[in-house]
Amino acid sequence: MTPTTRISTTTRGHGGAAEAAPPGPPAPRTRRPGRWLAWGFLAPTVVYLLAFYAYPLYRNVELSLREYTVRSFVQGGAPFAGLDNYRTVLADPAFWPTLAHTLIFTGASLVFQFSIGMALALFFRQHFPLSGTLRALILVPWLLPLIVSASTWSWLLNSDSGLVNAALGVVGIDPVNWLTSPTWSLTSVIIANIWIGIPFNLVVLYSGLQAIPVEVYEASALDGATGWQRFWSITFPLLRPVSAITLLLGLIYTLKVFDIIWIMTRGGPTGSSATLATWSYRLGFGNLLPEFGPGAAVGNLLIVMALVAGLVYIRSQRRQHLR
Amino acid sequence: MTTSPRRVWWKTAVGLVLTGLMLFPVYWMINVSFTRDQDMRASPPHLFPTNGTLDGYRAVLDQQLPYLGTSFLVGLGTVALTVALAAPAGYALAKLRPPGGPALSFLLLIAQMIPGIIMAMGFYAIYLTLGVLNTLPGLILADTTLAVPFAVLIFTAFMSGIPDELLQAAVVDGAGRLRTFWSIVLPVSRNSIVTVSLFAFLWSWSDFIFASTLAGGGDHQPITLGIYHYIGNNNQQWNAIMATAVVASIPAAVLLILAQRYVSMGVTAGAVKD
């Protein structure tokens, strides 16, 4: 079963014939003529995946292994360079700081998105008047185009006229150069990214909470467990699979976040908020003289990081399955 | 429920405050979009647009309509292509169990991990050779990659819920696979088609990275680039920037109002966003 379908089994109460349901046990493998015919239905998607996923990916790997100039990019015939582009990237003084920013950005975003999302999910789980409507409204930040969120936060965090500095001024704190000082730029984009990610965590964790049977809580209430005890001894362990998938998906999305950072700070000032994603873009598209080779190499490093995270997840799932 | 009514209303109050905090940036965007230029740098900033102006929205009407039109067309194209590709695939994976099906599902999952910047660079290299940079079909094809893996997974999950008896009955009546798909599976899957279409539209509408790399230099630029150029060019006219942002948020708002249950279904079932 894929992680995706596992999550979908936790949603309920939507009704309708097309209710998301876990795929049942596979039908007995009888020889039906339709089994190969099925590939007729899959063919368009497979062709599409090959042409528009596999081929761009292949081109990207190829870009990273050759020494491209603008001329050879258009006309072809770039010489094979082996791992030179990767060496260039690793030797670049910007590499380690950028990697560190990527890890800090991802780690801080995940920790805060997840814990705030969890707190909100637990709060909204107690049904009260308007709880459904309010929960739906909180989705708004997640649905907004990233350029909208990013430009709104840019203005909120503006050094001279932003509301955040005005509010800090009221409590006697000097204005902070959120987006224009190397000290604060990374923090600023992290704040904006946390805000965007909270709704996703809330919704997925909430649906996970819904799947925990009420009887479990009733039993523990009879045993006299307090709210805090109930959370640590029942909710948290039962929610572990959903938490794991939430964190994994969060990790994958956060690693590749590009829009927010690029729009708010362009990775600057002086690279202080650059991550691998924005660096890759800057190398490939951000300068007058594009460096496609190193740009593609940075992008491929990013894929490797996401894949490693995915494999770690699959391994841990399998181990849990065997137990 | 053992809690007293007073206790419950207290929770609603806390819920309102929390929601208000989360949505404050959205309010601020709307507030700034109505603020006059001369009040923009007021200290402290005006919390309400008391001397509101519609200048920002006039600027949107004057300058941003072509961008909005492009985004709309690209969105519709993305929706059509995504559903056309993914619905048959979902049906096959859910009901026909082809050899190699699970492997394909796994590949789709992996496909979602690929950072957009990498796809963009690959597309750029290909489009440059084919000469389809800065064209609508080019942007539609690229934007579709945002939605296809998600769409196939959603369709598969939803269509495995269709009772086998229903499909067998059709076969007994002499309907072929194609006929069954067209006149039974598709009508029954209306919910999932709506969900997929909504997300495909929203993602292509919100796309920035493909737009800036593949359509950044041409006549067909979507609204995300409209806003981006605004930020770059006239750094001072924030009411126009925020008014454009408000207009660009309309599809998200419409989606939430008209199709709230589909939205949470999509979030949890697919659990994807690019």
Image: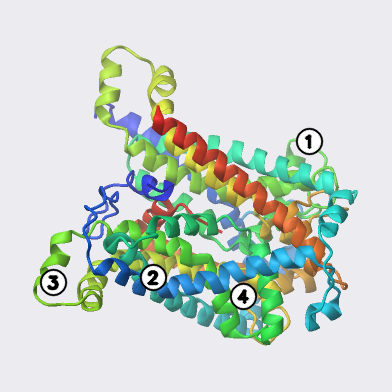
- Disc 3 marks a residue whose amino acid type is Ala
- The amino acid sitting under disc 2 is Leu
Give left or right: position of B82 versus B163.
right
Mark 4: which secondary structure? helix
Question: Residue B185, relative to residue A163: is it above or below?
Answer: below
Tell me the chain of label 1: A
Q: CA distance from mark 4 to mark 2?
A: 33 Å
Q: Which mark is residue A42?
A: 2
Disc 3 target residue:
B170
Name the amino acid, label 1.
Answer: Gly
What is the total number of numbered labels drawn onto the structure image?
4
Q: Which mark is nearer the camera, 4 or 3? A: 3
Pick the residue in front: B242 or A72. A72
Task: Tell me, yes or no, whether dots 1 and 4 are on the same chain.
Answer: no
> How far apart are labels 2 and 1 at the CA level?
63 Å
- Are the residues flagged by discs 3 and 1 from a single subunit? no
Determine which residue is flagged by label 1: A172
Q: Residue at x 81, y 78 (%)?
A: A77
Residue highlighted by disc 4? B223
Name the quadrant containing residue B63: bottom right
Assign a secondary structure to mark 3: helix
Gap between marks 4 and 3, in whole Å? 46 Å
Q: Are circles 3 and 2 on residues that touch, CB within 8 Å?
A: no
Structural crowding at the residue carrying mark 1, measured as other residues with C-alpha within 10 Å and reported as few (<14), some (14–19) or many (≥20): few
Q: Nearer the viewer, mark 2 or mark 1?
A: 2
Task: Name the spot of residue A245 as percent of width and height, x first.
Answer: 48, 42
**Badge 3 and badge 2 in a common chain:** no
Mark 2 or mark 1, earlier in chain: 2
Label 2 CA crowd tier, 10 Å (few <14, some 14–19, many 20+): many
Left of A42 or right of it: where is B60? Answer: right
Q: What amino acid is found at the position of numbered circle 4 in the picture?
A: Ile
Q: Secondary structure at mark 1?
A: loop
